Image (cartoon, rainbow, N blue to C red):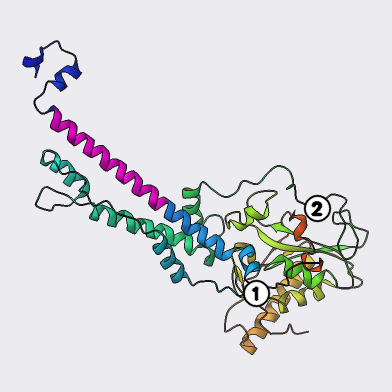
Amino acid sequence: CATRCGPQSPPWRLWLGHPRALPAAAVSLEVLASVLRLAWLSSELAAACWRAASLEALWASPLARDEAPGWPVPSSAARLRAVIRRSRMRLPRTPLISSPAIRCTRLGLLGVSTGTGRGSLLPALALVGAGSCLLARSFVGGSLGVSTGTGRVDQVARAFFGGPPSGRDTPIPDAPAPDGTHFLTGNPMYPPWPAGMEEAMFGMGCFWCSENLYMAKEGVYSSQVGYTGGESINPSYQDVCTGMSGHNEVVRIVYDPKVITYGDLLKVFWERHDPTTKNQQGGDRGTQYRSGIYYYTEAQKQLAEATRDKYQAELEATKAAGGRKISTEIVPAPTFFYAEGYHQQYDAKPGSRRYCGLSPTGAKLPA
């Protein structure tokens, strides 16, 4: 080529003057087309993983359970099958590279040999597809495991989707107004509370249901539903429903201990939900539905642990929970973030859906 075009010719003229320039250009175009096909395939696999997470969010969403309370939640295996069905795609039928001139490069990249000089995408797609299925399986099964913010499921999800919701510096716009009042009692929704009042906080599944158990009891001054125990501040309902913020749906109860005691509140807590199903109450699944007692004083902690032990013994004696152990977390009360105004005292408001996802075991707390 140097002889043909001249030794001082620019590189592009040397290349164009080569007798194999056109075949090399054709091969380059074919390689480019193959790269584009692989990029398209990667985008399809990424979309499949996103649909997997969307399916999981839908199955765990309280909005879905409100519209169809009897809708069954699929098993983990059924979820994986649904993801595989929804992630099917048309595979390229053309070989990756068909030019014998770069056969060695092709075989070195794919690690396969057909003996014909024409390689297939199938081995590479099988490897990529297997990895994608495992990734999708991590998302689909995520709500059935423990999400502490450091587990494998959380790490995979954060690496793929960019991390949990970041929250915000100010309260959510839909939070109750600072001068808002309780729908039933007419008392304030924000502290300071009157002298002598105490606070209790419980997580026992859907906070509509749990607040409904307490808000009309004699001695309850006020109640609020909100989010606690997560990794961000001022989360919204949408943030919590992603399953990645780590928050729990809770009810905070402001009560007069001279009228109703903390022990009375705990009796309702243990008997009116299932404390043995981790991150689940009935059809509601996700970390926001975990069972939790968040104490404000050492006396509350001691009473919570004592009643837990009593209730566990009762479950074992009556076999009410099928041999399962209590999974309730008993920890100091984290910061309470108010939920949106339309969630507050939801069951008491006209037009509310009469829904309750709590699943009591049927066992009674011994005196």
List the residue tagged with mark 1. 275
Q: Which residue is at a point 72% across and 79% down the rendered structure image?
A: 271
- Of the numbered discs 2 and 1, the one sitting upstream in the chain is 2
Which is nearer the eye, 207 or 47? Answer: 47
Q: Is residue 2 left or right of residue 41?
A: left
Q: Is residue 22 above or below residue 190?
A: above
Q: Is residue 293 visible?
A: no
Q: Is residue 258 left or right of residue 321?
A: right
Q: Is residue 51 above or below residue 78?
A: above
Q: Which residue is at a point 75% across and 60% down the rendered structure image?
A: 343
Q: Is residue 296 visible?
A: yes
Where is residue 286, by image quadrant?
bottom right
Name the dominant secondary structure of the magenta segment. Answer: helix
Tell me the quadrant of the picture where the C terminus can be found.
bottom right
In the rendering, which numbered label is found on residue 176?
Answer: 2
- Across and down, in percent, residue 57 comes to 55, 60
